[in-house]
């Protein structure tokens, strides 16, 4: 009986925290045979943590860090925005290329636009931790005619955490969520363009 209850609990907890990448509308068939895509990232109307706007979240964290140590919040804010181009986007692209079997190129016939809609930075204080998670809306459009949207995808609850529990830096945890998203979108493209 205990074993059955444990198995049910384990299955439910895996289901609750599983990531989903879904094709919502359109088709990925036009990508078949395409050697590469352009990839762009946007963060329009992104919420962070407990449904704060990104501005509210950044202002709150910056103020709290500056109260503890003058200047620390300003450095944190710079890192928050720099992590996008220095960590999140390159890791997404690396695993997207590996799993989609496509190059990322500015002159691709199609452009993948990855708009992050929610970021949960998570935490790790040694004795307790919460993984980072991101949600995103993805559009694949014709590069020369952006109004020609060939597909809409959603990324729901992409997890980010380091192996072994050594993910004390929120940027690292979020970076892993982007890497996971790139991997799963790449795999979806391959599976739907066979």
Image (cartoon, rainbow, N blue to C red):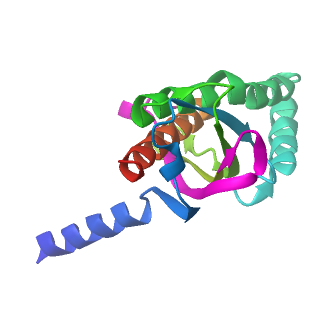
**Residue 175 in the figure: left or right of residue 18:** right
- Please name the residue shown 42% across and 66% down the image: 16
- Please name the residue shown 68% across and 26% down the image: 107
- The quadrant holding residue 173 is top right
Q: Is residue 25 magenta?
A: no
- Please name the residue shown 41% across and 48% down the image: 193
Predominant SS along the magenta part:
strand
Q: Where is residue 177 in the image (x, y as percent from the top left)?
A: 53, 41
Tell me: residue 128, above or below residue 117.
above
- Please name the residue shown 87% across and 46% down the image: 55
Is 97 or 28 nearer to us in this picture?
28
Residue at the limit of the structure toward the bottom, as seen here = 1
Q: Can residue 48 be seen in this view?
A: no
Q: Bounds of the magenta span?
A: 140-167
Is 39 or 167 nearer to us in this picture?
39
Is 20 or 10 nearer to us in this picture?
20
- The quadrant holding residue 37 is top right
How many numbered marks are there? Answer: 0
Q: Position of residue 67 (x, y in %)?
A: 87, 33
**Residue 193 in the figure: left or right of residue 66:** left
């Amino acid at each position: 009986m205990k074993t059955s209850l444990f198995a049910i609990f384990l299955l439910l907890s895996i289901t609750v925290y599983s990531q989903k990448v879904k094709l919502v509308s359109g088709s990925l068939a036009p990508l078949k045979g395409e050697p590469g895509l352009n990839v762009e990232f946007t963060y329009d109307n992104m919420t962070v943590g407990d449904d704060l706007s990104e501005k509210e979240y950044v202002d709150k964290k910056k103020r709290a860090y500056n109260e503890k140590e003058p200047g620390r919040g300003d450095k944190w804010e710079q890192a928050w925005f720099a992590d996008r181009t220095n960590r999140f986007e390159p890791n997404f692209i690396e695993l997207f290329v590996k799993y989609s079997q496509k190059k990322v190129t500015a002159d691709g016939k199609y452009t993948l636009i990855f708009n992050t809609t929610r970021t949960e930075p998570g935490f790790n204080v040694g004795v307790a931790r919460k993984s980072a998670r991101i949600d995103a809306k993805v559009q694949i459009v014709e590069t020369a005619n952006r109004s020609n949207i060939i597909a809409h995808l959603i990324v729901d609850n992409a997890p980010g955490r380091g192996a072994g529990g050594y993910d004390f830096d929120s940027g690292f945890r979020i970076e892993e969520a982007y890497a996971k998203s790139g991997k799963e979108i790449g795999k979806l493209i391959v599976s739907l363009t066979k």
